[in-house]
Every structure is written in C-alpha cells, then in structure tokens.
Image (spheres, rainbow, N blue to C red):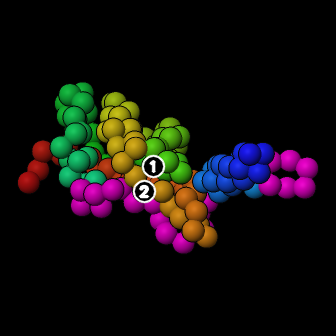
Amino acid sequence: MKNIKLIFTIACATLYFSSSNILIGQDEIVEDNEIYTDVDFEATYEGGTDALAQFVRDSFNMPKVAMDVGASGIIIIQFVVEKDGTISDLRAIAPKERQLGYGLEAECMRVLRLTSGQWKPAMRIGEPVRSYWRFPFEIDNSGGY
C-alpha cells in the first residue's frame, strides 16, 4: 500500500510541476514568471484578430468630452497575456504628455479588460508563457467623411 501512495504522490507532483512552469534548481524552487518576447507562438485572442477587432468596435464607448473637443489620434495599449489566458498590466505606452486624454486611454483599457480569459497564451518550448501584446486604437473625432 505504501508503494501505491508513493507512486501517486510522485505522479501528482510531476503533474503539478510540469503544468506550472516551475524550474527546480539545486537548492530552491523558482516559478517562471518572466515575460517573454522570444516565443515560438505568439499569444492570440481565441476568436482571432478579426473577432478581437469586432469586439473592440462593439464595446468601445466614445467619451462625450472626447467627441466635443474632436480628440483624434492613435492610442496603443500594452498588456501581458498570462499563462492562463487572462490579461494584466494594461497601460498606454505613450508618455503622459502625448496621450490623448479625455478618458480615451481609460476606455481603451476598459474594453481590453473585458477580453481577459479569452486569450491563448504564447508558447515557448512547448509550454505556455507570459508575453506582451500591443493593441492600437485609432480614434477619429474629426467629423469628416
């Protein structure tokens, strides 16, 4: 009976460590929380880029003040796609003085947060890893054609 418990414990430990991307060193166990830029497969939105673009179009609510002042430009939001398909660490990558303001950056981040959990993580050496992703929002309140 002891052999069965030992084998079961070893099997469970093996499954745990292989699914958690934990590196075992000589003296310590370290979880791999690095954010990778060199991956074999990039993170992707589960429905693909067309579905992501459609979701963003459907979910984005232009702040009234941004419409009133005619704020236009490009906002790039960077975030981390986690190993479990959630997203974190959202931020507008332009310096504060170059951001459009009027609540536009906040609205872009709000919309992207809604996609959390709907991502396939990046893969590196056959394992899911954390990676950066950037999404550009083109804001056009020029009132033209």
- Residue 130 within the segment the image draws in magenta: no
Distance of mark 1 from mark 2, alpha carbons?
5 Å
Q: Nearer the viewer, residue 62 or 84?
A: 84
Local packing at callout 2 (Cα closer than 10 Å; few below 14, some 14-19, many 20+) is many
User: Which range of residues does the magenta coloring cover?
Assistant: 24-51
Mark 1 or 2, nearer chain start: 1
Could you tell me the amino acid type at mark 2?
A: Lys
> Horizontal and vertical percent for residue 25?
85, 55
Which image quarter: residue 110? top left
Q: Residue at x 35, y 56 (%)?
A: 45
Q: Nearer the viewer, residue 84 or 3?
A: 3
Q: Position of residue 4 (x, y in %)?
A: 71, 50
- Assign the magenta stretch its main secondary structure: loop
Q: Is residue 124 above or below residue 60?
A: below
| Spot occupied by residue 76 in the image (x, y as percentages of width and height) | 41, 50
Q: Is residue 108 above or below residue 36?
A: above
Circles 1, 2 touching at the beta carbon (< 8 Å): yes
Q: Residue furthest left?
A: 145
Question: Which quadrant is the C terminus positioned in?
Answer: bottom left
Whether residue 17 is visible: no
Badge 1: residue crowd in 10 Å (few <14, some 14–19, many ≥20): many
Residue found at x 55% / y 59% = 128
Q: Is residue 48 left or right of residue 78?
A: left
Question: Three-letter amino acid code at disc 1?
Answer: Gly
* Residue indicated by mark 1: 85
**Which residue sits furthest right?**
27
Reply above or below: 81 against 48: above
Give the residue pinned by disc 2. 120
The furthest residue to the front: 1
Q: Position of residue 68 (x, y in %)?
A: 19, 30
